[in-house]
Image (cartoon, grey):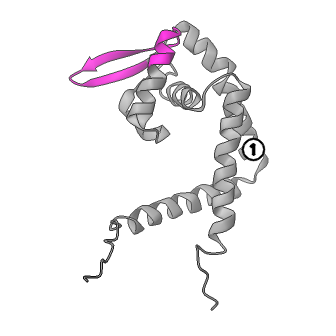
Amino acid sequence: AESMPHGSKAMRPFNHLFSETTEAYHDASVRLGLSYSMMQILYTVYDYGDGRRCPLREVCVQTGISKQTINSALRRLEGEGIARLEQTGGKRKDVCLTEAGLALARRTVARIMAVEDGVFASWRPEDVETYLTLTERYLTAFREGIQNLEPEQEHQEEP
């Protein structure tokens, strides 16, 4: 087998598709007048439970966005009267959409969800299942594979 200096041939298209998918969601956000992080927060809250409130912890987990970026976007959403944080006991907080926030979510993220649903509806059910199963398998194996990664120590030669 020919050794390759960086990555593998299989990872090139995977990484390209991953980047292009992220860019497509970013483009959808901009087209709808939202920052990417604001869209992800609205999406997560709107998709959770009754579509009006979601635990802040769940927003962080589902979006994968740093707490600092989430808090910055939430301050902006609060300032615009779109969302508010509500204490739910102890240190727990919920992100709650205001009526204006719910209306915004319906005009924006609900339309993105409709496009997503349309894509999956155009696929055979077994293809959707295969796609989701393989994506989950990849993510699980990747997370397991990186468990022991640590920065390599640079070897310095003694004079």
- Under circle 1, the secondary element is helix
In the image, residue 154 above or below residue 105? below
Total number of numbered discs in the rendering: 1
Q: Nearer the viewer, residue 129 or 75?
A: 75
Q: Position of residue 10 (x, y in %)?
A: 65, 72
Q: Residue at x 71, y 35 (%)?
A: 27
Badge 1 crowding class, 10 Å Cα cut-off, few under 14, some 14 to 19, many 20 or more, is: few
Is 16 placed left or right of 137 in the picture? Answer: right
State which region is magenta. 75-95
Say which quadrant the N terminus sits in. Answer: bottom right
| Among the 4 quarters of the image, the one containing residue 69 | top left
Residue 32 part of the magenta segment: no
Q: Residue at x 37, y 22 (%)?
A: 94
Q: Residue at x 61, y 81 (%)?
A: 4
Say which quadrant the C terminus sits in. Answer: bottom left
Q: What is the residue that sits farthest to the right in this orientation?
A: 122
Q: Position of residue 62 (x, y in %)?
A: 47, 39
Q: What is the residue that sits farthest to the bottom in this orientation?
A: 1
Q: Amino acid at mark 1?
A: Val
Q: Residue at x 44, y 18 (%)?
A: 75
Residue 79 part of the magenta segment: yes
In the image, residue 28 above or below residue 120? above
Q: Position of residue 28 (x, y in %)?
A: 71, 33
Q: Nearer the viewer, residue 65 or 157?
A: 157
Is 102 placed left or right of 24 in the picture? Answer: left
Is 24 placed left or right of 64 in the picture? Answer: right
Q: What is the residue that sits farthest to the left in this orientation?
A: 90
Q: Which residue is identified by label 1?
A: 119
In the image, residue 5 above or below residue 73? below
In the image, residue 116 above or below residue 43? below
Q: Position of residue 11 (x, y in %)?
A: 62, 68
